[in-house]
Amino acid sequence: MTNTRYDAIVIGGGHNGLVCAAYLARAGRKTLVLERRPLLGGAAVTEEIFPGFKFSVFSYVVSLLRPEIIRELELPRHGLQILPLESTVTPLDDGDYLAGWGDADETRRELSRHSPRDAEAAVLFGHLMHHMAMAVKPILGMVPPDPSSLAPSDLRSMLKLGRHMRGLGAEHFHALFKLMTMSSADYLDEWYEFDALKATKSASGIIGTFLGPRSPGSAYVLLHHYMGEIDGAFRAWGFQRGGTGAISETIASAARAQGAEIRTDAGVAKVLVRDGIVRGVALSNGDEILAPIVVSSLDPRRTFLDLVDRHELPDDLVSGVERYKFRGSSGKVNLALNGLPRFTCLERLGDEALTIRAARGAFSISPSMEYLERAYDDAKYGEFSRNPYMDIVIPSMIDPGMAPPGKHVMSVFVQYAPYQLNGGWTDQKREAFGDAVVNTIARYAPNIKSLIAGRQVLTPADIERITGLSEGNIFQGELALHQLFFLRPAAHWAKYRTPIGGYWQCGAGTHPGGGIMGASGRLAAIEIAGSGKQGAGSEGARG
Amino acid sequence: MLKSTPFHTRTAPLVRAQTWRRWAGHQVASAYEPHPDREYAAIRNAAALIDVSPLYKYRITGPDGVRLLDRMVTRNVQKCAVGQVLYTPWCDAHGKVIDDGTISRLDDTTFRLTSAEPDLRWLSMNAVGMDVSIEDVSERTAALALQGPLTRTILQQVSPADFAKLKYFRLVHTTIRDIPVTVSRTGYTGDLGYELWVDAGRAVPLWDAMIDAGTPYGLTPAGIWALDIARIEAGLIMLDVDYYSAHHALIADQKSSPLEINLAWTVSADKGPYNGRRPIRAEAARGSSWAFVGVDIDWTSLERAYAERHLPPQLPTIAWRGSAPLFRRGRQIGYATSGCWSPLLKKYLALAHVQSPHFAPGTSVEIELTVEHRRKRIDGAVTKLPFFDPERKRA
């Protein structure tokens, strides 16, 4: 039992928890962050897995970090430095490649090589997606109103949202509706003919979900990529110097500067509740720390089912959270390499400059729509994909500090690797999965096997075990339409409140979801600060 | 026909988008890639190699070298030790800046002066009656700026000199893979960095040696666009952009004293007579009517102006050089002369001249920018320069 009293305790030192703590401290609350692991960051951590080789172990690119957070917390002063990640190269099965470069003319010329029609369509598609992203962008910065509520604040928000949607015009409103409901395959079919292009674009619609490109609802996730482009100048997409762990450290530094206290190796066993009001937390080591406000940045399962007793919560919330879908579908393979992998599709041109240039961007293993759908088929029936979709980056090409000179680190995001694997994940299955990944890469970059100096394979079970993310879902729950906005994580409880007075939630499991965005941490802190010292508890949530 | 620099055979094949720019009668790369993002990132995160050969360079030798330079510039050259480098402006008799550059004391009686404009005539006029020889070595000497946090590590791979001991604004005569060079701990980026001075005949092997040793550390050839963003962040002024030479100004208002362009720190208080001393002292006593400051352009205000037109903020991808009026409470109080989006600080920055009494950091101003064809006044705040000042700059 410690004597220090805190105004607020944030459970979990992931980036959202840290953002929330920074804003709470900024609002004058004496704030404590408790992190179970010895290092901060949750899924945004950098670790030297093999001597000299540093990895963004889980999350590997910065996506959509909110500009207002960068500004308000003065993150550049605390070490934010996002480096450009400009291109994507998709090796094709006929030995050629498809590239998207940083320069519009180069990209158009490249697309024309495969389909002159698509090269022109890409410009129009880009414009439409720009409008779609503009339409959705305000929602990211908004506390979700409850559409079934008649509370004035909900009505005001709904009205604001309604006006905003009407301002889109009929054409864009209809396009948005289609985008929200269609599969990414169908949506892209309306625009493009070149299969590998559709496959590569649709890949961004399946990341972190248990959906295939032909599953309805997958189109919406495409939008997130375009959202990044609107904030392009902020480099909302890119590679943080020192890996994603450095982002967490940056936010932690900003939080400390505001007066927040951060403890690692301090896992929370239980949230203490009396008479429906939060009292504080009990740590795994038995210590109790009291505070009138406790914010859980863990995922909804942990927030509602693990940290508190179910009898403290209404049945419909408990069953809602029990039904909330995690279904981790991706794995991660981190490779320490003794040299640069050589992709045959580029190598055959004998242009070293092109090879180097491509290696500074991403490689997408998505040669065709059928390839992706078949990868999904394996997962649908409980196996990892024999030929998985992969998003590969070589951070040491962008940030030389990640590996010893002349050597490299490769980050491979792999989908699909279902959490519920037939027979469960074992060490053997993990290695077999790792082999499938390396063998698939070797088809496109044959020298990879001879370069590997170290290999770390992370299955969804490993991700769950290490980070605590339920079922290894990288977004704290699928980004599917039925789990977004006022339904994230559960109907009536999307405003960061919980039925327990003073107990709050943030994190990717709340609106607006995953990615190194920080938005939920900020919005939750703003709600808390606006609700008075005791926290609003269940008040107002039902209208 | 523009002249090419001694590195041209190496740089030309790398300029993918044929984006060249004119610098002192030479053609130099604006950027090697179509966009300068990666080149800029190299300056701040790894190492960048920049061809700065078009600088004018003069070799000044003889017993009166110190006297000549000390009489000409505002800094105290008497105190310049062998192996030291001074950054300094120099003025006309009215205390208005003609040019700015560096003075390197190569040995007891030899100096190298760099400048943005040709200054041979001015040097000769000042040297009347002195025992000194002045030689224009601009074409004989090639120069490479090696800038960025990993530059020291790279140099240690290729040169026997002790770079851990080479202090900020000092130089060392050494070799790089057996090529004789002078390495100065200087630059125009506000980062850890060096400038390599080499005989033009050995320029190409020096480039090759640096690329070879630096590539594993992310060394990237960078052009002027990337340099321009870095120098604005570092609050470093540029002749003909942020101020005009007193020798070229057509009207008095186009001239600036060192105090008016944020160079008060270069004006020695205790040195003997030099060009412009009396008017500069008088100005220092009564206070300057102009100051050169940073302006931090407010994002929310910019976003609002664009939102009126249903657009997200459009930011410059390269630094602009122009003139943007500055207002305070409806009255014009100055003008910005360069600006850029800082990819590092995530801020829209400008360098500006402001009139007294609006010098204080935090003073709110409005800058006139064109937003979708309409002139808009966007909020901003006067900011102390430099915008970016990492510890490694002096390390």
Image: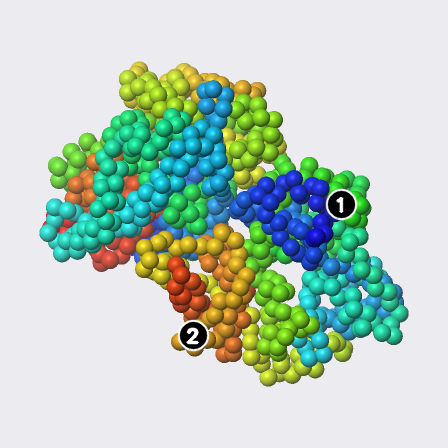
Which residue sits at x=65%, y=46%? B49
Give the labeled residue for mark 1. B203
Q: Quadrant of residue A208?
A: top left
A88 or A543: which is nearer to us? A88
- Left or right: B28, with B59 as reference point: left
Disc 2 marks which amino acid? Arg
| Disc ID at residue B328 | 2
Q: What chain does badge 1 belong to?
A: B
> SS at mark 1?
helix
Q: Is residue B283 above or below residue A333?
A: below
Which residue sits at x=68%, y=49%? B51
- Left or right: A322, with B324 as reference point: left
Q: Quadrant of residue B248?
A: bottom right
Image coordinates for residue B6, horizontal then vertical, percent: 74, 47
Q: Is residue A478 above or below residue B357?
A: above
Which residue sits at x=56%, y=59%? B232
